[in-house]
Image: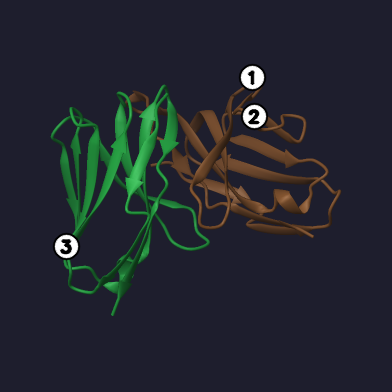
Chain colours: A brown, B green
Amino acid sequence: GAVVSQHPSWVICKSGTSVKIECRSLDFQATTMFWYRQFPKQSLMLMATSNEGSKATYEQGVEKDKFLINHASLTLSTLTVTSAHPEDSSFYICSVQGLTGQGATDTQYFGPGTRLTVL
Amino acid sequence: ELKVEQNPLFLSMQEGKNYTIYCNYSTTSDRLYWYRQDPGKSLESLFVLLSNGAVKQEGRLMASLDTKARLSTLHITAAVHDLSATYFCVASGTYKYIFGTGTRLKVLA
């Protein structure tokens, strides 16, 4: 499977600041990247889907102006939480999907996650 | 709309015992995945089930898929403490993952 990294692993910031989280696919052409958030003891909730070079598609209820997603290359996507507030504190996980030697696949490979705490 | 339900939501069991986690999904799904998540960590892939009747085993875990019943099971045999984690069933639909609620498993020594 693909190796996916996220940076940073955890971040603490003050309310009102913006935070950028990077998701990198280290050995895999990620034509599609997904961003999830997970609150404590809950399941993962899909926030948005991004295809390389296109605008992200956001799930219902997710504010696109607050959660800016950029997928500029086949190996990098970023999620920027703008003007973060305490209710944005969560565990953010990215995943990648794309091409293998056998062609396109819908299997997703998950990053290690980023824990965001907004004070 | 594809929905995925898991049961139970929480499971506490003694070491050495067997148990099954159930996963029901509402409409046709391309694939069914099982993942494990340890506290504070991301997801670890356990199984991918591709077709009706598929059965996969890894150590003390065995997963199966019945597409006609839209049911997948994760069976735990002779549980050990190291299996304590949250287990997610995930159905795949139009290249999106739909996550189940998760089952928090706690294995008591």
Query: Which marked residue is nearer to the observer: mark 2 or mark 3?
Result: 3
Q: Which mark is residue B100?
A: none
Asked if badge 2 and badge 3 are on a common chain, one would say no
- Is label 3 on the same chain as label 1? no
**Total marks drawn?**
3
Circle 1 crowding by C-alpha within 10 Å: few under 14, some 14–19, many from 20: few
Three-letter amino acid code at disc 2?
Answer: His
Sequence-wise, the earlier of marks 2 and 1 is: 1
Q: Which mark is residue A54?
A: 1
Nearest to viewer (mark 3 / mark 1): 3
Label drawn at residue A71:
2
At which x and y percent is residue A42?
A: 51, 52
- Image quarter in which the N terminus of chain B is found: top left
At 79% across and 60% down in the image, what residue appears? A119
- Amino acid type assigned to the residue bearing label 3 in the image: Thr
Circles 2 and 3 in contact, beta carbons < 8 Å: no
Residue B77: numbered disc: 3
Q: Is residue A101 above or below residue B18?
A: above
Q: Chain of mark 3?
A: B
**Chain of the residue on which disc 1 is drawn:** A
Callout 2 touching callout 1 (CB < 8 Å)? yes
Q: Position of residue A71 (x, y in %)?
A: 64, 29
Mark 1: amino acid: Ser
Left or right: residue B73 compared with residue A16: left
Along the viewing direction, whichever of A54 and A72 lies nearer the viewer: A54
Of residues B49 and A43, the one nearer the viewer is A43
Classify B92 as above or below A53: below
